[in-house]
């Protein structure tokens, strides 16, 4: 029998989406086929400390990580195992575990979905699931993402990007400029975040000022967008490297005025937001959503997976690319795997495909020479 692949599943992290990541990782680890994979659970605490433990999910969820084994990864492709860090009586000892064959970062938001962990894994020479450094970073930054969409002729909402420094220096002028260029209502957002943290819908100048102040708590770059009138939220799952495939689209019906943090994670039962799969939209719109999702995916040089999110105006029928989430929510009831299930791919199969894509991408990158041979 072939040796099982050692797969590091990383969860938690220094992000406002720490808890969501832990919930996603719990589902991923529970579904992985143990005949094929040896799962190495890896947690990152909210402080950024890396640990490993048989029940890392429990340790992180309980906030009891002091007794877990502290570990690190080296930026050295010759040693791809976790380094155990032991401090005993003032002497630091290290030992290295067996190498990891692949890592599945189940991390959402900052320091995980934004290219930082991907950079570490590149340096370590370990294949990993999902987008690379560039795709992750562009997917995370709403301002740069919109620039790339625009350059590829893909439809996006009217928006303005403001540096926090400019906002701090002249708030009144910025409120006036935005009000005259975009009108109301608008959405204010930190450029790099997720789960709707720091996002406000603003109806007038006073709430715009409050919204920008709120966004400025989280990022040095702020974005204001014209609100799509009577917006419907259509999402589709993309999977693959150079030749991605796309699922049936779904629709989110938020439990609140917009799909806020509360609507995403806190409202429960009859008050919860609903997922409609497949999305009740025309076949023409379905085709357009699928086509735009692939174009957006390739435009940011994404690989592995992404959930492409669209805003559809039920007033004007206009469709806009809102964002690509390169590590979408991954619990067994999350939109990304649900859309694949509706398209004929089980949750377990999806994990197999993602790991296969990680290995394929790594092999492809290894073909590239990193030294120039001067001809003699
Ligand atoms: N321009 C917009 N028009 C209408 N609704 C919007 C707009 N931008 C954001 N929203 C609402 O806010 C939610 C969160 O915004 P989004 O850009 O998706 O941020 P996040 O990355 O935090 O998910 C969306 O799902 C939608 O409900
Ligand atoms: Mg979103």
Image (spheres, rainbow, N blue to C red):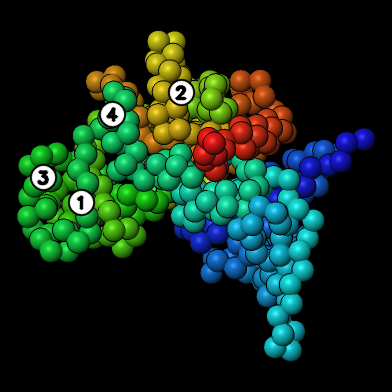
| Label 3 vs 2, first from the N-terminus | 3
**Which class describes the residues within 10 Å of circle 4: few (<14), some (14-19), or many (20+)?**
few
Whether label 3 lies within 8 Å of ligand 1 gets the answer no
**Which residue, given by chain and number where applicable, does mark 1 sit on?**
162
Q: Quadrant of residue 149?
A: top left
| Label 1 vs 4, first from the N-terminus | 4
Q: Residue at x 34, y 55 (%)?
A: 198
Q: Nearer the viewer, mark 3 or mark 1?
A: 1
Q: Find the distance from the CA under tag 3 to the CA under tag 2.
A: 34 Å
Label 4: which secondary element: helix
The answer to which of 161 and 332 lies nearer the viewer is 161
Can residue 254 be seen by looking at this rendering?
no
**Which residue, given by chain and number where applicable, does mark 4 sit on?**
151
**Which residue, given by chain and number where applicable, does mark 3 sit on?**
179
Where is residue 309 drawn, in percent x and y? 42, 32
Asked whether, in this view, residue 241 is left or right of residue 188, the answer is right
The answer to which of 73 and 325 lies nearer the viewer is 73
Q: Find the distance from the CA under tag 1 to the CA under tag 4.
A: 20 Å
Q: Quadrant of residue 239?
A: top right
Where is residue 321 drawn, in percent x and y? 35, 29
Label 3: which secondary element: helix
Q: Residue at x 44, y 10 (%)?
A: 283
Q: Find the distance from the CA under tag 1 to the CA under tag 2.
A: 29 Å
Label 1: which secondary element: strand
Q: From what the image shows, is residue 314 above or below residue 42?
A: above
Picture quarter with the N terminus: top right
**Which residue, given by chain and number where applicable, does mark 2 sit on?**
294
Picture quarter with the C terminus: top right
């Amino acid at each position: 029998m072939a040796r099982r692949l050692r797969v590091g599943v990383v969860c938690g992290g220094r992000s406002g989406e720490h808890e969501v990541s832990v919930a996603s990782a719990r589902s991923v680890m529970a579904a992985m086929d143990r005949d094929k994979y040896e799962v190495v659970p890896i947690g990152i605490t909210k402080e950024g400390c890396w640990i490993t433990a048989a029940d890392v999910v429990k340790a992180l969820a309980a906030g009891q990580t002091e007794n877990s084994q502290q570990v690190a990864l080296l930026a050295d492709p010759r040693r791809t195992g976790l380094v155990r860090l032991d401090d005993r009586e003032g002497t630091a000892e290290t030992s290295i575990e067996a190498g990891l064959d692949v890592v599945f970062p189940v991390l959402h938001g900052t320091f995980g979905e934004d290219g930082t962990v991907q950079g570490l894994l590149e340096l370590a020479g370990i294949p990993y699931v999902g987008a690379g450094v560039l795709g992750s970073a562009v997917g995370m930054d709403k301002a740069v993402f919109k620039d790339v969409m625009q350059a590829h002729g893909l439809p996006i909402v009217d928006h303005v990007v403001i540096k926090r420094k400019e906002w701090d220096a002249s708030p009144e002028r910025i409120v006036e400029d935005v009000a005259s260029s975009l009108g109301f209502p608008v959405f204010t957002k930190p450029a790099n975040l997720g789960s709707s943290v720091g996002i406000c819908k603003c109806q007038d100048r006073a709430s715009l000022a409050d919204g920008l102040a709120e966004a400025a708590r989280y990022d040095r770059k702020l974005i204001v967008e014209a609100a799509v009138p009577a917006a419907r939220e259509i999402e589709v799952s993309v999977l693959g490297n150079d030749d991605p495939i796309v699922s049936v689209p779904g629709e989110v019906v938020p439990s609140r005025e917009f799909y806020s943090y509360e609507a995403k994670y806190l409202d429960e039962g009859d008050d919860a937001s609903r997922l409609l799969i497949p999305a009740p939209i025309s076949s023409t719109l379905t085709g357009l959503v699928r086509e735009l999702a692939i174009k957006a995916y390739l435009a940011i040089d994404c690989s592995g997976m992404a959930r492409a999110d669209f805003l559809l105006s039920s007033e004007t029928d206009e469709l806009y690319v809102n964002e690509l989430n390169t590590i979408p929510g991954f619990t067994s009831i999350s939109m990304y795997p649900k859309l694949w299930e509706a398209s004929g791919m089980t949750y377990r199969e999806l994990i197999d495909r993602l790991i296969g894509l990680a290995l394929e991408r790594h092999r492809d990158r290894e073909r590239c020479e990193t030294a120039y041979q001067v001809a003699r």
